[in-house]
Image: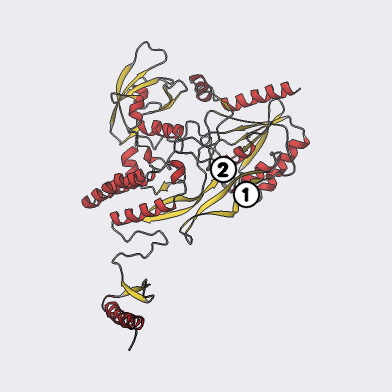
Amino acid sequence: MPNTTQRRFAALQSCRAGLALLLAALAFVTGCTTATMPIFGIPIPVPRSSTNWAGYAEGDFQGRSWTQAFDLLHGRLSREYPFTEWKGIKWDTLYDTFYVRVADAQARGDKRAYYVTLRQYAHSIPDGYMEASDEEDFREAAIGGGYGISMAPMDNDLMVVYRIEKGGDADKAGIKWGAQITQWNDKPIGEALKSAPDYWSDAPAATYVGRTLDRCMFLTRGPVGATAKVTFKNRDAQKPQTVTLTAREDHYAGLGDVVHYARDFSEVESPFESRSLPGGFGYINILSQSTTLMTPFPDRGFKKVVDKLVRDKVPGIILDLRGNEGGNMALARAYAGHFVDGERSLGRLVAFDSAKNGFALNEKESITVAPREPHYNGRIIVLVHRSTRDSGQVIARALQGQSNVVVMGVLGTEGSLAQVGGEITMPGGYVLHYPVGRYVDEKGNALISTNAEGDGGVEPDIVIPATVGLFEAQFARARDSLLDAAVEELKRQTASKK
């Protein structure tokens, strides 16, 4: 007679066989995939979910409803975005805020509301690598009109007009260059700025200063025909005035940085330029770390520039990184190598690894700057601005801290540095790009990218105050005030060295 163990084993075998037959029948009727069942250790068919996962791996969510696609978008971003802890991103709060807006837009079939919600969602993440597709019709309808002025904050917290459209509404209303704006639509200017539609900028500002400047730009815009009640005080006036301005079509005049350091260059131009300055100093302006037809081997061309500076025994140079849009990281390391006095390991890459379903250190990807010949060891002033972006910031960071280097600027750099590559396509063909990796220093802190408090980027060692006088020299007298200050600083340094 079989013992208890044998009876239990026979019962288990019978159960296995019966379960297998039952699940096989279910699979035949419904269609399925398979999984291994615990305890029994047999492959079992599992009815397929009604959710369509086609295209998920590629980030293509176009075949879903707006709410389904948003669920997938949010799930993917909250899993793969590399700065969640560093920037203090509260994903649950973002989901609760924006899902209801997407659902409302879907219920009403409002494509514009759906698109604007996607932009606002992306711009809630303070990272210059977050980008959403443009929809020109919606953009023009929202901010196609300008009130004829541009303004910027000064160091004393005053909001000052630095551009007036000749013959525009503000000009006709008597607003003059240098006027102080105190109220906008009956709100103190600081409060009014908080509601400015800065989500129409190309990418979110990473720093507090960058966000403020973006809001200044977009507060002075609106739909064509919209009106704004503006209180201002001209420099030669005893008391403020209040006028009502109407937004006119102006082809987006006034959008962009206060000073447009960045510029496009063609394939028959070099991505950097050099010249001599008064006092026998040298000047190198690096616009981008990239190649052109004119400069197919930019590292060789740059080497020749430095070689001439060394041979001529130039006592000091100005390395201008304002408007540097970034580019090839290897070129950034090569350029910086001509000026560093020793090897500098700036950061290593931690990136999302889909195979590991998490973040992992990539030992092959690091930012290490090694000395290169010819080596320039004279005085160096590095000029930066918020238009110094991407790998342009790496050049500044590699040099900062050396005894012969001073970083100077009115503002720090843009404050975003990451490995790019994330892409999601939403219904309507709207594409959202996002970073997938962060560079970290030896302490694990993100390199250059701003933190939850908005601190980051490469901050100047010498900050030139943003004053009305500085702006007046820049705009009224067409002087590059920061460059002038850099030359004076070089004169002071070389004189004291002698």
From this view, report whether residue 397 is shown above or below residue 149: below
Q: Quadrant of the N terminus?
A: bottom left
**Residue at x 32%, y 65% (from the top left corner):** 52
User: Residue 363 in the image: x percent, y percent?
Assistant: 59, 54
Q: What colouring style does the render use?
A: secondary structure
Q: Quadrant of the C terminus?
A: top right
Which residue ends up furthest to the bottom in the rendered image?
1
Task: Sort mark 2 into few (<14), some (14-19) or many (20+) by Cα contacts within 10 Å.
Answer: few
Which residue is tagged 1? 330
Residue nearer the viewer, 92 or 438 = 92
Which residue is tagged 2? 443
User: Residue 49 in the image: x percent, y percent?
Assistant: 30, 67
Left or right of 407 on screen, residue 110 = left
Q: CA distance from mark 1 to mark 2?
A: 23 Å
From this view, report whether residue 131 is shown above or below residue 11: above
Left or right of 236 on screen, residue 11 = left
Q: Secondary structure at mark 1?
A: helix
What kind of residue is marked 1? Ala
**Residue at x 39%, y 75% (from the top left corner):** 41
Which residue ends up furthest to the left in the rendered image?
108
- Mark 1 vs mark 2: which is more N-terminal? 1
Left or right of 315 on screen, residue 487 = left
User: Residue 152 in the image: x percent, y percent?
Assistant: 43, 27
Checking the image for residue 309, the label placed there is none
Residue nearer the viewer, 1 or 455 = 1
What kind of residue is marked 2? Lys
Residue nearer the viewer, 36 or 418 = 36
Res. 137 in view: no
Res. 18 in view: yes
User: Residue 395 in the image: x percent, y percent?
Assistant: 61, 40
